[in-house]
Amino acid sequence: MKTKIVKTGVTLRSAAASDAPALGRLHVASWRETYTGMIADQMLAAQSVEKRAAMWKRIISDQQSKTAVYLAEGSGVIVGFGSCGPPRTEQLLADGYDAEIEAIYVLRPSQGRGVGKALMHRMAWDLAARGYNGASLWVIRENARARRFYELLGGAVVAEREDRRAYGVLNEVAYGWRPLDQLRPG
């Protein structure tokens, strides 16, 4: 299903396996735009377009995957994406957050124009249609811009964690929406 965001001229659509190379490029570019100065330089340098593209192709092509991937596209160029599905960890499930917004990234020139909000709303509709009741997402604690965005969408901090990875630790907070109606427009 395609959805046109009139305000920005951006269209939302489901990702196809053929989108994986562009999705990999956007994912790495958005990490570098967003996290420079927040996370270890080695972690940013280790990002690989090829690895991200292969990851997205695998996720999108997997017929058994419960992850949905949506793209925001303007003038034939992907400017943002989001993915959602069942929680990847058990940490928040016991608190009623039975779904996860796994990723949401919008390139900086398209931020502040309703693209991220439209992606979040589309993922909330998707999750609700699949019977999920609440959603959470993890964000780096120091990412003040993203945290303000999630708070404006009604998200509340529901957990914290240290995510240990190669080249460093990500200190993260989880935002949650329960019920999902809090995140879906009327």
Image (cartoon, grey):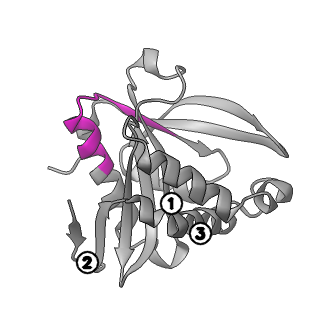
Q: Position of residue 149 (x, y in %)?
A: 45, 56
Q: Nearer the viewer, residue 69 or 153?
A: 69
Q: Residues within 10 Å of mark 3 (few under 14, many from 20)?
A: some
Q: Is residue 131 magenta?
A: yes
Three-letter amino acid code at the position of disc 3: Arg
Q: Is label 3 or label 2 in front?
A: 3
Dot 3 and dot 2 residues touching (CB under 8 Å): no
Query: As rendered, which of 81 and 53 lies closer to the eye?
Result: 53
Give residue 138's quadrant in the image: top right
- Residue depth check, mark 1 versus mark 3: number of the one nearer the observer: 3
Residue 4: give its label: none
**Residue 78 magenta:** no
Question: Which residue was labeled with disc 1?
Answer: 105
Q: Which stretch appears magenta?
A: 123-137
- The residue lying at 36 percent from left, 79 percent from top is 74
Q: Earlier in the sequence, mark 1 or mark 3?
A: 3
